[in-house]
Amino acid sequence: MTRDLKGFISCLVVFLLPVVLVKVGGGLLGSPGPSMAAGSSIAVKPRPFKPPGVREVLWTAQQKAAADHVVLLETEPFGSTPFYYRQSVDRRTPFPEDPSERPLDDTPPQLSLQVVLTSRRGNVALIDRKQYRVGDLIKGDDWRVIKIDGYDRSVTLKHEETDRTEIIYVPTSR
């Protein structure tokens, strides 16, 4: 035999001989116990694991409300958005139906301009936590957005009946 063949056979003997001996010995001696696992029909309820030294956490009402809000947000079909706000109910009394009875009030409204966003599809202003575009009406259908300037971060409003214009700006910290 060649030297390579002798080396190959010796490797087979060294590696396969222990496997063959274990298989033959297991067959001759038999298995030490049942080969099938059997379970009990009695259901045992496991005790909850509580690490030593850990006390139960008591949440405050505010923490519980925050946790419930997080669960609510996880169930929504869309991701979180900076424009999310809870819609408030307007409890003001409506104006009379006859325009002649309605008092003419063109005082500028107290508005807070938070953000001006510019894009190819048009500019958007966030005023009092609501989105407005050019042409939208604000504050009881009296004031209309006529210009949103992204460079100056300003919005120009125009009163519908008196044509009075007001410009509001995004506040800057200096």
Image: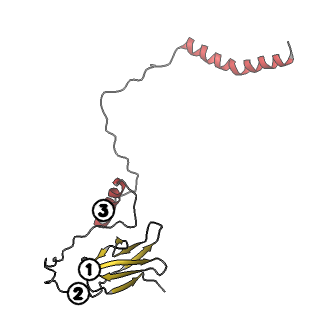
> Is the residue marked by circle 1 packed among few (<14), some (14-19), or many (20+) residues within 10 Å?
some
Q: Residue at x 33, y 43 (%)?
A: 47
Could you say whether the residue bearing mark 2 is in a helix, strand or loop? loop
Q: CA distance from mark 3 to mark 1?
A: 42 Å
Camera-side mark, 2 or 3: 2
Which numbered marker is on residue 105? 2
Q: Amino acid at mark 2?
A: Asp
Instruction: First in sequence, mark 2 or 3: give its number.
Output: 3
Instruction: Tell me where residue 171 sits by quadrant.
Output: bottom left
Residue 48, horizontal then vertical, whole percent: 35, 46
Q: CA distance from mark 2 to mark 3?
A: 45 Å
Q: Residue at x 22, y 70 (%)?
A: 89
Residue 56, horizontal then vertical, whole percent: 33, 57
Q: Which residue is mark 1?
A: 142
Q: How many marks?
A: 3
Which numbered marker is on residue 64? 3
Q: Amino acid at mark 3?
A: Lys
